[in-house]
Amino acid sequence: MTGEDDNQFRAARLEKLAQLKALGVDPYPYAFARSAEAAALEQRYADLAPDSVTADRVAVAGRVRAIRNGGMFIDLHDSSGKIQIFSDKKLLSEPQLALVRLLDLGDIIGVEGIVRRTRRGELTVNATGITVLAKALLPLPEKYHGLADVETRYRQRYLDLIVNEDSRAVLRKRSRVIAAIRQRLVERGFLEVETPMLQAIPGGAAAKPFVTYHNTLDIELYLRISPELFLKRLLVGGLSDKLFEINRNFRNEGISPRHNPEFTLLELYQAYVDYEAMMEMTEHLVTEAAVAAGGTTRITYGGKAIELAAPWRRAPMAALVLEHTGIDFLAIDGGVDARAAARRLGIELADTAGWGHALYAVFNTRVESLLIEPIHVTGFPREISPLTKADRGDPRLTERFESFINGWEVANAYSELNDPQDQLARFQAQMHERELGDEEAQRLDADFVAALEYGMPPAGGLGIGIDRLVMLLTDSPSIRDVIAFPTLRPKG
């Protein structure tokens, strides 16, 4: 539809708006006393026989999606479904019939009337009164072609939601997933908390932050890349032995079908357990989310059937790399030989990259996409895990795992590092990497180290990306499908 077409339709609707006002109708009233929604009426009158009229009066409201026979029949859609409206001159006054003639697709109206079922079996409200609640000045996309342009769907999400039931279903499932996760954590004794979005030192993840400025304090601040270091401060303070937060994080990085600059993350911490407990927690929360979204632990994504029921496979990163490339990184000593092994596979690395960076690069490039069934990948290198306790059997590794489904990382968890001297050394190593040019390396947070010096109990920590999880559970090809208002480049 062209802009010229829009202008013509808008002009016609503005004329109808003027006519409504001339009839003494307020086209944008303050409220309407609705007594029922479409889905509830369908359930209540499921046994009503065809060609039956009740004595029940109801008041419904919604958006006009179809007008037939000059307004005699109207399909009214609310957030729960559709109800048919019958407008007859025997039941409506002439001013009301004149109002009906001025209705357009997209208008929001309220209807009072009597419930009946037509001869053809359509549940219907015989209108005795119609109220215009919002006159639509722009037309909806065509009924039969819908809103096919993907860019428009994301930019004008309100239009997408009006015309595409699938889009509404995805975002409703997202809400159910978050609610189910929150409920299960509360049932397990976790306390929900909130931590700062604006941070003086961005930390808790390897990522490039967004920078802003506070005028009164005269300082730069950063949109948080992770809540981790503040949640651990709460653990130090003894607020609770079980904490969680579900909230936004921001990373100034690339955009892709699986990455949006702002995203929703669940992050939780539990005192006196290690990362083994977090594996069980991940399986529990993901399966509960799957049941909340679709009623089953078996999902289909991109035509592939995936079973999410516990227990999931567990495998060390180095073992998976050996399985898929034939290279045994555990038998390699030092960064020089590790870089050479990666380069033999066509993977380029900086000359400063250590053994752990090389192992992770090979895993990321050659193995990750092959992990379709749920799996916990353990044994992450120490070099890339600055907030994690060292592996009890190999100091090159840590007690960290990432959970993969469909080749995607959906969870990241640690046995949390609580030794302040070790943590300071890890931060200093990260600062050295920043000096060598790694903008994503973590910064030294001296106050966090000080907090650890007061004593933090041993703990397991877990992060689950909500957006990516919802993508899997709704078979959505892009992260933009599961975020109501994804980040887009401005038009023009």
Image (cartoon, rainbow, N blue to C red):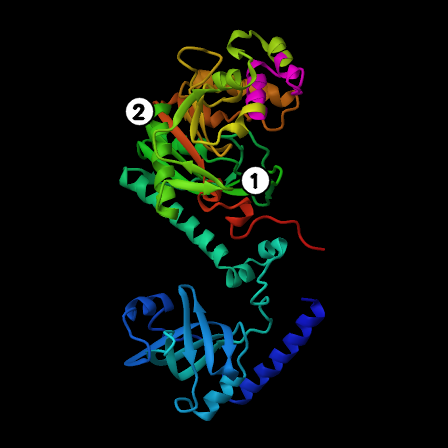
Which segment is the magenta one? 341-365
Q: Residue tagged by mark 1?
A: 259
Kindly indicate whether the residue at mark 2 contacts the one at mark 1 (C-beta within 8 angstroms): no
Q: Distance between the residues labelled 1 and 2?
A: 33 Å
Q: Residue tagged by mark 2?
A: 272
- Dot 1: few (<14), some (14–19), or many (≥20) neighbours within 10 Å? some
Q: Which residue is drawn at 39% across and 36% down?
A: 307
Q: Tell me the SS state at disc 2.
A: loop
For the N terminus, which image quadrant?
bottom right
What predominant SS class does the magenta segment belong to?
A: helix
Q: Residue 126's x, y, as percent?
A: 38, 82
Q: Residue 414's x, y, as percent?
A: 42, 25
Q: Which residue is drawn at 57% across and 45% down?
A: 216
The quadrant where residue 268 appears: top left
Q: Residue 218's x, y, as percent?
A: 59, 41
Taking depth in this image into account, of 477 and 446 the one nearest to the observer is 477
The quadrant where residue 138 appears: bottom right
Q: Tell me the SS state at disc 1.
A: loop
In this picture, is 219 found above or below 5? Answer: above
